[in-house]
Amino acid sequence: MHLLSQVRLGMDLTKVVLPTFILERRSLLEMYADFFAHPDLFVSISDQKDPKDRMVQVVRWYLSAFHAGRKGSVAKKPYNPILGEIFRCHWILPNAENEDNTEPVSEGPIPWVTKNSVTFVAEQVSHHPPISAFYAECFSKRIQFNAHIWTKSKFLGMSIGVHNIGQGCVTCLDYDEHYILTFPNGYGRSIPTVPWIELGGECSISCSKTGYNASIIFHTKPFYGGKKHRITAEIFSPNDKKSFCSIEGEWNGVMYAKYATGESVVFIDTKKMPTIKKKVKKLEDQEEYESRCLWKDVTYNLKIRDIDAATDAKHRLEERQRAEARARKERETSWETRLFHEDGECWVYDEPLLKRLAATKH
């Protein structure tokens, strides 16, 4: 009721103060790392020898990327990142422990990990509008991913809609291929009772070099009947109007693929695929503006269910952010991002693998 008293239909929710108890005990920047909960699927894109297979593998990784971020059935909201907040982590691939390539990367998001690891970094690059940029790479597989997401939330009566504006780009360095993809919108449904999350909207993945492309639809549940979390997708060869592969199922369950050849297979089974746990530096080794360190008082108090203390800790962070913004305005200085820069409409990581490898060639 506290929430509903502040809102009107169609209102932008950035102005609304959400009660602390519906928070998820982690930052949105950390949630974006869940796109790589199956890092093995991500790196295997570059293992495919044929452009058609690479496209299929990009789609497989993309469709596997949503279930991990939504573990529980009850909708919780991650913290809105503070301007300049950064989150870093990495994953050790399942069979990488026994490989010989154990030398450190020495550059990139996490310079001390081995070249076989998948590394990830995210930064909150803008506060108004709220834009998060994130980047991931695997040195030994010569693959990288760069994305920015700008969220716009609206109140829709019984639900909240979060519109994700932005795009991501998977780059396979060995093939000089860039796969541009977009993200679905999120909805928090039945807010007054037991909220749950659903994804909705049409997304696309396309590679301009090879001409392969895919269209993906996240179906929202119809008001009467119908299933939750349905997805359908079609993958097209260059210049073809008819897809060579259609996929359907649930993004948090099993998805089946049917090929033009008539063959039907399980495309992804999220129930059977173990997610790989990300590794994050210990809290005491983190810098002040890293997500878990920044939010540690809020997280701790939510954990011990001291809602008032959590709310106070959150207020302190937000107040500090406002004070810093006022100070910049008075000095007439603009905010300097740490790891990403604006390039046209996109936010790009300053030192991507592509750039570093190009520099070593010359």
Image: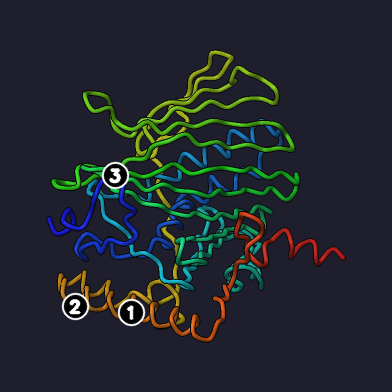
Other-residue count near label 1 (Cα within 10 Å), few / some / many at <14 / 14–19 / ≥20: few
Residue positioned 22% across, 78% down in the render: 312
Give the distance between the C-alpha atoms of the residues marked 1 and 3, in whole angstroms: 29 Å
Give the distance between the C-alpha atoms of the residues marked 2 and 1, in whole angstroms: 15 Å
Q: Quadrant of residue 220?
A: top left
- Disc 1, SS: helix
- Disc 2, SS: helix
Q: Is residue 172 above or below residue 249?
A: below
Q: Amino acid at mark 1?
A: Glu
The picture places residue 353, in percent across and down from the top left corner, at 69, 61
Give the distance between the C-alpha atoms of the residues marked 2 and 3, in whole angstroms: 27 Å
Residue positioned 41% across, 58% down in the render: 277
Residue assigned mark 1: 319
Residue assigned mark 2: 309
Nearer to us in this view, 278 or 62? 62
Residue assigned mark 3: 197
Q: Are marks 2 and 1 in contact (CB under 8 Å)?
A: no
